[in-house]
Image (spheres, grey):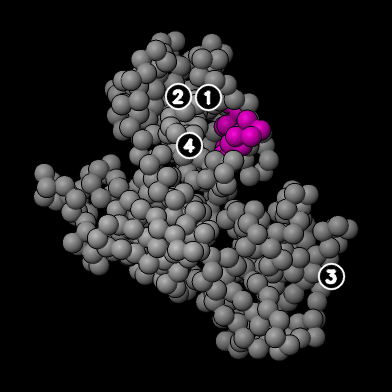
Amino acid sequence: MKYTVRIPKILYLSLLISKYAKDSMYYNTNDLIKWANEMKPDLVRTRKDKDEYKFLDDTNFGGLRGNFSTLLTFRGILKKNNTYTTYYGVGKNDRLFNAYKKGEIILDSHEYYAYTYNENLKKLLENEARGLTIREEQAHIKVFLKNSEDLGIYRDNENFKKIAVVKSLNNQYFLRILFNTFVNDNIIEYNMYNYLSGTKIKQYNIHPLFVIPSNEKSWDKIFVMDAKDILKNAPLFIYYDKTKDKFYDSKENVYNHYTLEEGLNILSDQNGNIDERLLYNWDEVKDNYIQDRVIESFNNSTDEFYVFLENFLKWKKEFKIYDKTVCSIDVSSSGGADVIITFNDGTNQKLELEHKWNNYILHGHYKSIAWKDAWLYADEPFDFELIKKIFSPYIKEYINFIPKVYLCINSITKEKEAYEVDWINMSYKQLDIE
């Protein structure tokens, strides 16, 4: 069955220019603006009243950059040389980009339609279009407040001109947390980067404010939390389960939440939570969430497959494990594990490539069936105590999505090694590999 999905122009444009991102998952609005101007300048200018609307010198919160910023999903933090940078994508992974490049999605340039025979891709397209609408409508907080004067909160334009901070009549401060994406039909992911970064939450006692979208409204329910609960764990992402009415983070910490009306009667004002704010250190928090360290520029030297090929395979795409010989190693474009290994008996094995063991968790692979029974390679030595610390919290619920076979390099001999972990008995054994 052929599915037809009407998609927003900015999503259409991002798919067209996706070939520029084929070698790297690292990009942001500046990358997309550059690629759009190079590849599709005819689609970039969308307003006649702004001659420079399409160029890189548009304002930080308007123009093409603003269009892309409401499209993109926040994915994490990188350390590039001595600086930190955030990176983004369309959706939780690059499934849509890969599908377009493989021809699973066909685009109509006249009416901005996308066509596919894959029902899952249809749903992904619809979810990204919906997510874009939610981000756009939640970004227009001034409009919402103007139409909701009875809420008892208003913008503090004097202290926070370009940040969605609101203030109550009782001198309480709240920052609207950014909707990031839908994990599934019931779970919403929120991006805490704007809340946690910088010094604003040290200077002001700002509580997080979450807007829960529904199928009908982008502004449906409003919940707030106490800043001290967030500063204690400093989660980069927070999840809301609509069926359980529960907020939690990737480490399964659960957070108390209140309706806005309750919060206005409970939470502390601008001068509260002094101890928590004094102890909070964004630089330390940031270091905890670096997913990759990039040297000089985003090039092949930082690509996981390049590292795997050079360090583990030593440029020979054959090795033997479980008494079977690997006869082919192919980069996967399915949106799941990075590599498909083919053995001489015709069987296949998924292999995820990461720079660090904990990136598998930080990237959320343990939640997706696409990584079921996958092996894991990381460019760091095998340390069972570290492996247990990283993966054991997720075993009870996601055991089939947690790797059991780990490939790595011995830090002394620089030779390839393989380990099999028994998560039931919390033990491991080294495998013969050659």
Does the residue at mark 3 contact the one at mark 2 (Cβ under 8 Å)? no
Q: Residue at x 76, y 52 (%)?
A: 395
Name the outermost residue toward the front.
1
Check disc 2 and report the residue beneath it. 174
Residue 391 in the figure: left or right of residue 278: right
Check disc 4 and report the residue beneath it. 215
| Disc 2 crowd, CA 10 A, few/some/many (<14, 14-19, 20+) | many
Residue 429 — which label? 3
Secondary structure at badge 1 equals strand
Residue 224 — which label? 1
Earlier in the chain: of badge 4 and badge 2, it is 2
Earlier in the chain: of badge 4 and badge 1, it is 4
- Specify the amino acid type for callout 3: Lys
Secondary structure at badge 2 equals strand
| 253 over 323 or under it: above or below | above
Secondary structure at badge 3 equals strand
Position of residue 301 measured from the top left corner of the image (x, y, whole percent): 47, 74
| Disc 1 crowd, CA 10 A, few/some/many (<14, 14-19, 20+) | many
Inter-mark Cα distance, 3 to 2: 51 Å
Name the outermost residue toward the right.
425
| 107 over 168 or under it: above or below | below
Bounds of the magenta segment: 228-247
- Specify the amino acid type for callout 2: Phe
Inter-mark Cα distance, 4 to 1: 21 Å
Q: Residue at x 59, y 74 (%)?
A: 339
Earlier in the chain: of badge 3 and badge 2, it is 2
Does the residue at mark 4 contact the one at mark 1 (Cβ under 8 Å)? no
